[in-house]
Structure formats: C-alpha cells, structure tokens
Image: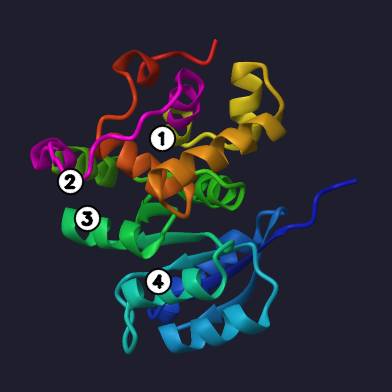
Amino acid sequence: MASPPLKILLVEDDELFRLGLRVRLDREPNLEVVAEAEDGETALDLVKSQALDIVVLDIGLSGLGGIETCRQIRQCVPTLPVLVLTSHTQKAIVNRMIEAGAQGYCLKGCPSQLLILAIQSVAAGASWWDATATTEIRAAFEHQGTSDPDHPKVALTQREQEILAWIARGKTNQEIAEILYITPGTVRVHVHAILQKLEVRDRTQAAIIAMQQKLIAPDELSKSED
C-alpha cells in the first residue's frame, strides 16, 4: 500500500512563482500542496487549521516577514518542519533562519528534483542545507572560535558523537540505524540524550552546535557509509 502524499503549505509572496512551484510539486505522486499563503499571518492561520507535513517558506515576505513567520510556526507546532526556499545567501540571514528553527534551506533556481529531494528529506526528519549556505555557515563558525570559559564543551559518548556526525550530514534516524546496525529506537534514545546535553530543541540546532563547538571528532565526520 502506497504512503499518503506529503501535505505541503507553500508560503510565497510572488504569485507567479508560487503557481509554477505548485504545478511542479503536484506532479509528484508523493507530494501535495494542500494550502498556500502569500504572507506570514495567513501562513500561521493555516498552520493552526490544516494537517501539514512540511512548510516551504520564502524569507522575503511582507508583513510579519519570513524569519518571524518561521519562528512562530515552530513555536505553534514544534514538530512541523520548515524548509526555506529563497534567493538570499547571506550568512547572517542563514544563521537567523537556523536560530528561528528552520530545518532546511534551498536556493530559488535550484533543479526541481533537488528541491523535491529536500522536501522529502526535511519532512522525514533530516536537515537540508544548500551547498552555498553550508559553506557560509561553516566559514562563519570557523572564524567565531569556541573558547568560552562560561560555556565549556559538552561531554558526548563515542556513540553519541557517531550519531551526531550523521545528523550533521543530514541522515534520518532510520538511515543512521541502518549505517550503525542498531534499531531506530536506539537511535531515538541517543538523539534525545544529545538534545538534552546540548540543551537544544531539535536536530538542526544540535548539528549546528556540533560544528560550532567542534564536538565531533574529525574522523567521525569523514567516515563513509560502508
């Protein structure tokens, strides 16, 4: 029996772009745009009234704005993932979107199949960052430095480091379980422990802190899936 299609809320203030994107996404049998909004206020109303699997959100919204809309969506429905689709690549904006709780970021103009894969991955619980954004984020963290006597590094077990490394590479719990030959339930237990130790609310923030504070051994990040 086929899985039901992912229910998408599309938030975009450019009507022609929104229409074109909806037509393209609706061609996929496992995707369905069930609601649209051209501003943040409408998006928040729809989030409260619709059963959704993911929000595809543009930063450049009028009124409430994309960043605040993302933050309020995550506060209203913490389990609802948000994928940002925008033309902005400035690292300051990318970092603000991460702080607001976005789980993914793609540039407008990317190949449609890449966007579809990003939607599927984020809806499944993985993070997804455009290559340009990822480079910006890494560069920013490398220049920030991590020595802060008031915030010492968190002690993670070897297994937690392994799992956090795969989270940082965008893997879902199921994929991590298959790679490490453990059950998805075991992965969930470790992920919960990681979030508690890092004092963050979701996997995306955990991955960012892992890079920022260098919590993962370099050899863990370079491991293959074999």
Q: Identify residue type, mark 3.
A: Thr
What label sits on residue 71 in the rendered view?
4
Q: Where is mark 3, residue-wise?
A: 89
The residue closer to the viewer here, 219 or 49, is 219
Helix, strand or loop status at disc 4: helix
For this view, does 213 lie left or right of residue 18?
left
Can you tell which of label 1 and label 2 is closer to the viewer? 2
Q: In which quadrant is the C terminus drawn?
A: top right
Q: Earlier in the sequence, mark 2 or mark 4?
A: 4
| 93 vs 189: above or below | below
Residue 100: quadrant of the picture: bottom left
Q: CA distance from mark 1 to mark 2?
A: 25 Å
- x 50%, y 28%: residue: 163
Residue interval drawn in magenta: 141-164
Q: Earlier in the sequence, mark 1 or mark 2?
A: 2
Q: Where is mark 2, residue-wise?
A: 150
The residue closer to the viewer here, 79 or 67, is 79
Residue 107: quadrant of the picture: bottom left
Helix, strand or loop status at disc 2: loop
Q: CA distance from mark 1 to mark 4?
A: 21 Å
Mark 2 nearby-residue class (10 Å; few <14, some 14–19, many ≥20): few
Residue 189, percent across and down?
63, 36
Q: Earlier in the sequence, mark 3 or mark 1?
A: 3
The reply to whether the magenta stretch includes residue 149 is yes
Q: Are marks 3 and 2 in contact (CB under 8 Å)?
A: no
Helix, strand or loop status at disc 1: helix
Residue 144, percent across and down?
11, 42
The residue closer to the viewer here, 62 or 223, is 223
- x 43%, y 41%: residue: 197
